[in-house]
Image (cartoon, helix red, strand yellow):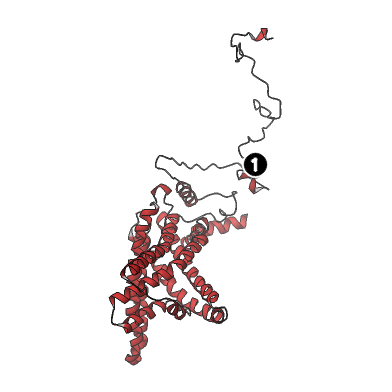
């Protein structure tokens, strides 16, 4: 423990290391992997309705310009490594009568809101927004509509930058500079879109400076995932998409979406840890109760408890009690969990050396000091019972 204590004190004194550890612990406390999986699932379900909306909208806006429509769709699907070409072949615009198209568009909008709600739920969880303050399902869907507008801006930006990158080859030696500039502008634009999403999709009132670091991290992470994801899918899943067909497509798409979702959730955690001063954390706090909590630990655990407030008239108070060593669970960590092991409501074994502490194993003795025994006839004296 001496070595562990020195390491713990060292990481608490180092702001950078302490911050990184706090982000990792907050990610684990919030079950960030499951939040990312939920975002991945709804992103997968929302992807095809969103692409359907894109192709249908382009059919109306760019009617008579099929080449431009193809360029917009191609530049958008180029964000999906390897599998973008297959997605382009599978998505077609809605066609038919005006009523049929309107119904189809409404259905696509409804289907595309799942990912926005999943991101909003993750933001509220990370920011520890009390349940009572979170929007009801109806208003949550209305709030999620803003994400469709953000995605539309992203498609427009991607198309313009793709055109710049494609035409950069005409400038000879300046082509590399134009490509680097396009990547920089794309990263800045993605950071702006993430910034707006982080502010709009959470029920907590946040300032721009509180969410800016996470937005920048998410934008840089997007570029990194684009590079690493392309390499991974090209070497690991390219053959499988040809062999397994649809299964390979789904596997590659889910893998890529999960990488992005993890980056987004980590970006949320960075903002929450920084804004809430939730660092440094005790090094062993996720693993044992035999640890001295820091002020940041107490703030974090208090926020988790108060996030479970369902009603405005419900009061949630958090108290930390420093248990003596002999009362800490030594060999059975499950004994502190209600319903597992020893009954947590049972009183601790009394110390027979302490005067005035009753022995629970002794037979209960009724109190006979009263003059009367309550019963059907309250006037019967105790001494004249039949």
The reply, left or right, for residue 80 in relation to residue 58 is right
Q: In this view, does 143 lie above or below 260?
A: above
| Rendering quarter of residue 223 | bottom left
Please tell me which residue is depicted at 54% across the width and 56% down the height of the picture.
9
- In the visual, does 118 lie left or right of 248? left
Q: Is mark 1 on a helix, strand or loop?
A: helix
Task: Give the quarter of the figure containing the C terminus.
Answer: top right
Where is mark 1, residue-wise? 326
The percent position of residue 270, horizontal first and vertical second, equals 44, 61
Question: Against 5, is 45 above or below?
Answer: below
Image location of residue 83, percent across then percent down:
48, 78
Residue 63 visible in the snapshot: yes
Nearest the camera: 116 or 137? 137
Q: Which of 208 and 247 is in front in this view?
A: 247
* Image position of 385 with respect to 322: above or below: above
Front residue (pair 149, 193) = 149
Q: What number of labels is visible? A: 1
Placement of the N terminus among the 4 image quadrants: bottom right
Residue 28 is situated, as x and y percent measured from the top left of the image, at 53, 58
């Amino acid at each position: 423990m001496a070595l562990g204590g020195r390491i713990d004190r060292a990481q608490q004194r180092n702001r950078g290391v302490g911050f990184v550890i706090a982000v990792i612990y907050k990610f684990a406390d919030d079950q960030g992997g499951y939040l990312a999986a939920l975002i991945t699932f709804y992103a997968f379900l929302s992807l095809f309705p969103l692409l359907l909306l894109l192709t249908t909208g382009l059919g109306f806006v760019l009617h008579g310009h099929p080449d431009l429509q193809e360029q917009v769709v191609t530049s958008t699907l180029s964000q999906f490594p390897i599998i973008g070409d297959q997605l382009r072949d599978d998505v077609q615009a809605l066609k038919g009568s005006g009523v049929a198209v309107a119904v189809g568009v409404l259905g696509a909008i409804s289907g595309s809101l799942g990912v926005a709600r999943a991101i909003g739920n993750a933001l509220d969880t990370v920011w520890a927004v009390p349940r009572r303050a979170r929007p009801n399902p109806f208003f949550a869907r209305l709030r999620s509509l803003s994400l469709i507008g953000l995605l539309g801006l992203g498609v427009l930006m991607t198309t313009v930058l793709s055109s710049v990158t494609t035409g950069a080859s005409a400038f000879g030696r300046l082509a590399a500079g134009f490509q680097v500039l396009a990547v920089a502008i794309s990263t800045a634009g993605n950071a702006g879109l993430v910034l707006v999403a982080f502010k709009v999709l959470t029920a907590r009132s946040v300032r721009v400076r509180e969410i800016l670091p996470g937005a920048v991290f998410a934008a840089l992470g997007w570029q990194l995932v684009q590079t690493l994801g392309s390499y991974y899918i090209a070497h690991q899943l390219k053959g499988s998409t040809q062999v397994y067909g649809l299964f390979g497509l789904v596997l590659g798409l889910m893998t890529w979406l999960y990488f992005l979702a993890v980056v987004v959730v980590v970006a949320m955690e960075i903002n929450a840890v920084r804004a809430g001063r939730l660092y440094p954390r005790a090094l062993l706090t996720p693993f044992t109760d035999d640890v001295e909590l820091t002020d940041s630990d107490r703030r974090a655990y208090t926020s988790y408890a108060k996030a479970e407030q369902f009603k405005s008239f419900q009061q949630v108070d958090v108290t930390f009690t420093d248990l003596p060593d002999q009362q800490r669970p030594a060999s059975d960590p499950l004994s502190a969990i209600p319903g597992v092991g020893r009954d947590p409501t049972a009183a601790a074994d009394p110390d027979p050396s302490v005067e005035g502490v009753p022995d629970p194993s002794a037979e209960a003795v009724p109190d006979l000091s009263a003059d009367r025994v309550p019963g059907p006839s309250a006037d019967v004296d105790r001494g004249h019972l039949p």
